[in-house]
Image: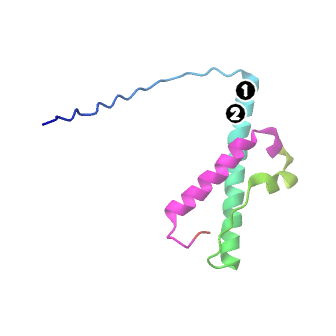
Amino acid sequence: MEEKAEAIVISKCMEFRIKPDDGQKILIWKTFGCCRFVWNHLLDERISFEALNKGKLLNTTPAHLKKDNPFLCEVDSMALINTQLNLNQACRKLLPKGKVP
């Protein structure tokens, strides 16, 4: 009879401290502000779309916001896209299936 060995799970954690210079601090805060701006505007668009088109899904990207808000071009586009993906995931988890604002 064979005995099965138990799996040993080892978790490692690393902690890093960053020390950004003044220019990097400004870029970090601009990125946070732009992500907050994109989240709020995309959420507002979803809610407005849901009010007009019952049960339909709106999935837009932050690219259309850059035309009217050129300050969004100053930050990394991947941060803005991740904000959109996080909003989509939050709406899927929070709302009942088939009811996405």
Which image quarter is the C terminus in? bottom right
Does residue 33 show up? Answer: no
Residue found at x 49% / y 24%: 15
Residue 7: numbered disc: none
Give the residue type at disc 2: Ile
The stretch drawn in magenta includes residue 88: yes
Residue found at x 74% / y 31%: 26
Give the residue type at disc 1: Gln
Percent of width and height locating residue 28: 69, 33
Secondary structure state at the residue bearing disc 1: helix
- Measure how far apart labels 2 and 1 are at the Cα level: 6 Å
State which region is magenta: 72-99
Q: Identify whether 4 is placed above or below 34.
A: above
Residue closer to the observer: 28 or 4: 4
Residue 24: numbered disc: 1
Q: Identify whether 18 is placed above or below 2.
A: above
Q: Main secondary structure of the magenta part?
A: helix
The stretch drawn in magenta includes residue 11: no
Residue found at x 51% / y 70%: 97
Tell me which corner region of the image, top left, top right, bottom left or bottom right, holds residue 88.
Answer: bottom right
Percent of width and height locating residue 59: 69, 63
Tell me which corner region of the image, top left, top right, bottom left or bottom right, holds residue 8.
Answer: top left
Question: Disc 2, disc 1: CB below 8 Å?
Answer: yes
Percent of width and height locating residue 45: 71, 65
Q: Identify whether 77 is placed above or below 17.
A: below
Q: Badge 2 is on which residue?
A: 28
Tell me which corner region of the image, top left, top right, bottom left or bottom right, holds residue 23.
Answer: top right
